[in-house]
Image (cartoon, grey):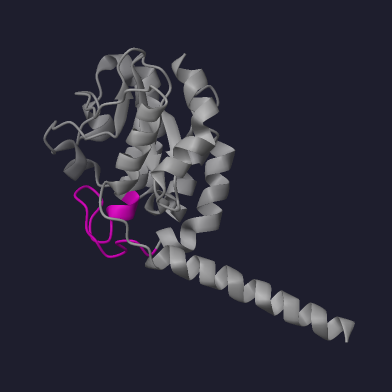
Amino acid sequence: MRIRKKQCLARLAEIHQHSARKRLQDVKMPVGDCEKAFLEAAAHEGIQLVRYTQPWLNQRGHFGLPGDAGAVFIPLDKIFHELGGDGEAQSAKRTTALPGDFIHLPTGTMIEIDEVQHFTTFRMRTFAHYPVEASLGFDTDEYVDLCKRFCRTADKYRLNKAASGFGPGGRQRQRAYNDALRDLVIPAMGQPPLIRIPAPDGDGAAAFERNSVRILRSLS
């Protein structure tokens, strides 16, 4: 009886985990709702954030970097080719600035909110090429763990969507590359390390609460 009870409990746990993953897959948050909730939660704590772009974070990626960020060209080039990027297509793009999430103007600190689509297998592979001396505002080990946890869901998101510079089905690889681009270029340009806030459940307010101590410490 004890063995049978354990088997039943194990099966119930398995069903619960499957249901939780299914709910996460079925949740389709309106575009921008997670960031809006995060913004409002930050404002409630007296943290004023605004949207940002930087001219040196542009569509050409590491092919459009100024000399000041030259030290990160090699690791970014390795990441780019690891993800199957097309250098000719990428370097021919316009230098239109990539839109970012938020910046805290008094300190110049930039913040990115990462929903579940950021935790792909491709994203996990980028961290192997980060220089050991890279100045980061988040824990890469935590992000690798999150990629392992959510990649089944994330790897299905816009699976077949094409992306310039990465070809057919390249949208996930482009996102992973652009995330790495921000991580390495921002501190290389003399700015504070980029803060990444994981929000795989799409709840921006809860993501702020979970990371509020780290955020406040970084902005003080």
The answer to whether residue 136 is visible is no
The answer to whether residue 109 is visible is yes
Q: Is residue 158 magenta?
A: yes
Principal secondary structure, stretch drawn in magenta: loop
Residue 74 falls left or right of residue 212: left
- Horizontal and vertical percent position of residue 66: 24, 19
Q: Is residue 57 magenta?
A: no
Relative vertical location of residue 63 with respect to residue 187 in this rendering, above or below: below
Relative vertical location of residue 85 with respect to residue 99 in this rendering, above or below: below
Which residue sits at x=55%, y=56%?
149
- Horizontal and vertical percent position of residue 195: 43, 29
Of residue 48 and residue 51, the one placed in the foreground of this image is: 48
- Figure quadrant of residue 156: bottom left
Which residue sits at x=52%, y=19%?
217
Relative vertical location of residue 7 with respect to residue 197 in this rendering, above or below: below
Q: Which residues are magenta?
A: 156-173
Of residue 136 and residue 111, the one placed in the foreground of this image is: 111
Of residue 146 and residue 135, the one placed in the foreground of this image is: 146
- Figure quadrant of residue 43: top left
- Figure quadrant of residue 154: bottom left
Which residue sits at x=26%, y=55%?
30
Which residue in the rendered view is the most extreme toward the front? 44
